[in-house]
Amino acid sequence: MIDLRLLREDPDRVRASQRARGEDVALVDALLSADERRRSSGVRFDELRSEQKALGKRIPKASPEERAELLQRAEQLKTDVKAADAQQHEADEEAKQLLLKLGNLVHPDVPEGGEEDFVVLETHGTIRDFGAEGFEPKDHLELGEALGAIDMERGAKVSGSRFYYLTGVGALLELALVNAAIAQATEAGFIPMLTPTLVRPRAMEGTGFLGQAAENVYHLEKDDYYLVGTSEVPLAAYHMDEILDADKLPLRYAGFSPCYRREAGTYGKDTRGIFRVHQFDKVEMFSYVAPEDAEAEHKRLLEWEKQWLNSLELPFQVIDVATGDLGASASRKYDCEAWIPTQGKYRELTSASNCDSFQARRLSVRMREEREGRKTVQPLATLNGTLCAVPRTIVALLENHQQADGTVLVPQVLRPYLGGREILEPLAK
């Protein structure tokens, strides 16, 4: 959530951010009104309680004549205090609920617009000319089925559409990707983590996934648990309700977990193959830093993602995501999009988001530091970056590294994790 003091002092900035996101601007005024009622009813409650306490001290010392009048006033105060407390509680709850609906403040340099209004910041690698090489590229599913690596038919039989099996070299390729990604992250100073995939409502709400993204979240109503769509959720909640020493920052974690997404609103999109699925594995980077270090950390996360994609020898572009496509928690987001030959376009593979103190405020994660001889406690900043979303990475690898004979070249970085294999081909039966 954003800082309420900022909302009071500069509501126009918050309105502008909501407008840029394409979100409800009236929410800002509703929140200001609820906050004012909360504060005024709090003052009223404090005044009545003070009078009530003072009256309680006067009654034992009062004369019989005065006591009857004071007791009558005490009864009225009792009613008024109860009413003021209820008003304060009601306004406080309304303000909290409205505050949870408000997105993070958009960074001033983010391009405005929707999904297609991103700005390309840089490109890497060379797009292959398959025509010059003398063959037509196959898509990842055709390649994967021929290699005995992907089985969509049985995935659908067992679990329904958008489910799949990775088999043979497909399974080995996933394990190689995960191990190589974790190795890079560990070398960069991240602590490897295997995280829970079932979380309580506060963890999901605290990271901002029960707002506009709620339709894509699986909820187990009987137990009131949520299945995570990214290990960002349990990593963000890992230090929930804790105060961290500033001199221990940054704290960096690399989480591996299965992820689950309903993919609501994507009917008819990416229905072939494993690009858009309900269940997938992912390696996610997550950082806790001091607020003043957040922008620099954001660029570092992006550099680690670029390092990873370059090591996989994939052509890709880096984009600055537009305001309407940020998600509630991010103030700014960079995506790395890999070239998919059979689609003839770049598609998102990784994403790096700066959430500033938005998630930390919601999850009550704070930092303690000493400044000018005084110890202070304040919210810190959180950032997240996808290192390897496995199915989409497999899609890009199969299509970009395919050969005319249907085999697939293995990038150098993965060969140690694939028993030295230089090419992917069907496993011998």
Image (cartoon, grey):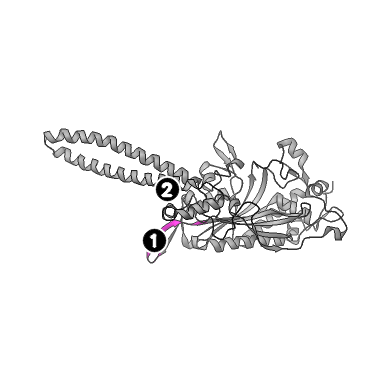
Query: Viewer-nearest of labels 2 and 1?
Result: 2
Position in image of residue 420 (x %, y %): 78, 58
The answer to whether 198 is drawn above or below residue 340 in the figure is above
- Residue underneath mark 2: 32
Circle 1: is it few (<14), some (14-19), or many (20+) Cα within 10 Å?
few
Amino acid type for the residue under numbered disc 1? Lys
Q: Position of residue 364 (x, y in %)?
A: 46, 50
The reply to whether residue 119 is in sight is: yes
Question: At numbered mark 1, what does the secondary structure look like: helix, strand or loop?
Answer: strand
Q: Nearer the viewer, residue 225 or 3?
A: 3
Instruction: Read off the magenta span.
Output: 371-381
Q: Is residue 320 above or below residue 49?
A: below
Identified at 66% across, 53% down, the residue is: 116
Q: Which mark is residue 375?
A: 1
Q: Earlier in the sequence, mark 2 or mark 1?
A: 2
Name the magenta segment's main secondary structure: strand
Left-right relation of 27 to 129: left
Q: What residue is rendered at 58% in x and 54% in y?
A: 323
Residue drawn at (53%, 51%), measured in percent from left and top? Answer: 19
- Name the amino acid, label 2: Leu
Is label 2 in a helix, a strand or a loop?
Answer: helix
